[in-house]
Structures are given as structure tokens and as C-alpha cells.
Image: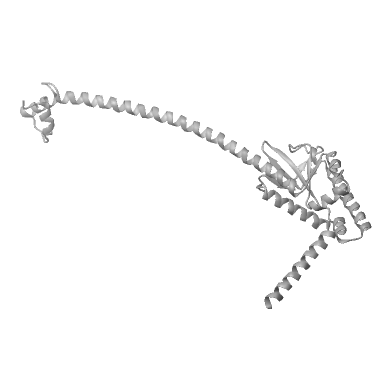
Amino acid sequence: KEQIINLRELNQQITKEAKNLTDALRVDNKLQGSWGEIQLENILQSAGLKREIHYFKERNVKNEFNENQRPDYIVKLPDDKNVVIDSKVSLLAYANYLATEDEQEQLAFLSQHVASIQNHIKNLSGKNYQNLHSISQPDYVLMFLANEAALIAALQTNDGLYEMALSRNIVIVTSTTLMATLKTISYIWKHDLQNKNALEIARQAGTLYDKFVAFSEDLSRVGSQLQTTQNSYQEAMRKLLEGRDNLIRKTERLKELGAKTSKALDQKLIDQSGLDS
């Protein structure tokens, strides 16, 4: 019984919070905008893009008149190209449309909803983001509408919204279509990274090959020097040990003649010199 009571209270709290959120979104345009930007950023991150690396929020850029502009999001592409995405939320009239069952009111609210989206298109077109000179980008911007159902309802009322936006170099996108676009951009980044890695591997392989060649040349010189040393050693040993008048024999004879010494030659060397034969 206690658990059921707790569950009922929790359900009431969730219902109240959902209603508060709905009411706030209806009347607070700033909150609507923030909600839309949160949805947009979630999609960016879900697509595998990283903030401050692949995309930037409200980055200051200059237009052709050197005036400051702050698009909601700038998404980077390889080769210093960019795509501008601006989030627009149109919920008030749509929420009123859903809340009424009167057909005449529904038609009126749908008309207001379409007009709201048209105003968003006009306002975004007026910002002229597609002509920002400080970034390289296509000649269009993406206008993100977070509520896909709201867009579908507007298009059923006025199917010319897409054409109206395109005529102003604006492409309307929703969560579904934007995710597909951003996934493609994410794949391009991965492919670009793989290509750069391949180039780096090739560069390092070339460096390694050059170092290996230099090492093999050094090793060959060491071998030649060792061979020269070996030849010199053998020649010195021949002088020391070979022939009837070798150095061992001459030196030992000096000792036999009475030269005062404190040390003696190694008996093995004496034997090799054939001194006793």
C-alpha cells in the first residue's frame, strides 16, 4: 500500500512538472529557444561530433560589412569548410491546436503555426548567414525545427514551406533529417582522419627506411673496419711469430745474451714462434 501511494505521488509530480514545462514553453520564447538548442546539441553529440572540435556554439563571425554575427551552431568539415545550423522553435500555436477539439479553432491555430514558421524563415534569411565571408560554407544554411510533428502539421496545411525556405537559401531540417546529415559529416571526418593517418604512416615509413639505409651503411663500414683491424692483427702476429727471424726469437735472444728483465714472455707465444725447434 505504501509503495502504491509513493508511486501515485511520483506520477502526480511528473505530471505536474510536465505541465509546468509545457506551460513554460508556450509562453517563454527564450525557454523555447534554449530547449531547441539542447535538442540540437544532443543530435550533434549523438552523431559523434565533438564540441569545440567539430562544431562551435554561438561563435562570433564577421559578415561582409565586418559586423558581428553569432549563428547558433557552426559545424566544421574537412578542408576548412563549414555548415551553419540555426535552431527555431514554434510551439505556442501548435500546442493550442493540440489542446482544442473545436475544428474552427484548430484551423485558426494551424494557420498561426504556419505563419510562425514563415516568420522564422524570413528572420533567418534576414541574418544572411549563408554569405558570411569569414567562414567557407555552402550558399545555404540549415534551419532546425526540433518538433517534427509540428513541422508535419504545418506542411499538411501549407506544402510550400520547403520551397519558400529554399528560395531564401535555407534548408528546413528536423531531428531525423539532421541526424542523417550529421552522421554523413561524422563519417567524412573519420575518413579524413584515416587518410591523414595513412599519409603519416607513409611519412614515418619513409623516415624509417632512410634511417635503416643509413644504419646498414654504418654497419657495413664497421664490418670493413673490423676486417681491416683483423688483417692488421694477423699481419702483426705473423711478424711476431712467423719466420726464423721473428720478433719473439729476437727478443728472447736478447734475454739469453744477458739483458736484464723483470718479466717473461708468455710460453705459448714462445712455443708458437718455434724458438725451441
Q: Residue furthest top?
A: 244
- Expressed as whole percent of the image width and height from the top left, the position of residue 88 reads 81, 50
Residue 220 percent location from the top left of the image? 36, 27
In the displayed structure, 225 sits above or below 198; it is: above
Residue 200 placement: quadrant:
top right
The quarter of the picture where residue 33 lies is: bottom right
Q: Residue at x 74, y 50 (%)?
A: 40
Please give the count of numbered marks on the rendered protein: 0
Give the camera-side residue of 181 and 225: 181
Determine whether, in the image, residue 134 is placed left or right of residue 265: right
Q: Which x, y percent locates residue 67?
A: 81, 42
> Where is residue 190 shown, x and y percent of the image?
62, 41
Kindly identify the residue that appears in the image at 84 percent across and 59 percent down: 26
Q: Identify whether 177 is placed above or below 15.
A: above
Scheme by which the image is coloured: one colour
Left or right: 157 with respect to 42?
Answer: right
Residue at the limit of the structure toward the bottom, as seen here? 1
**In this rendering, is residue 61 above or below 237?**
below
Instruction: Identify which residue, 132 or 260, lies in the foreground.
Output: 132
Which quadrant does the C terminus fall into? top left
The image quadrant where one finds the N terminus is: bottom right
Q: Residue at x 86, y 41 (%)?
A: 164
Which one is in front, 111 or 68? Answer: 111
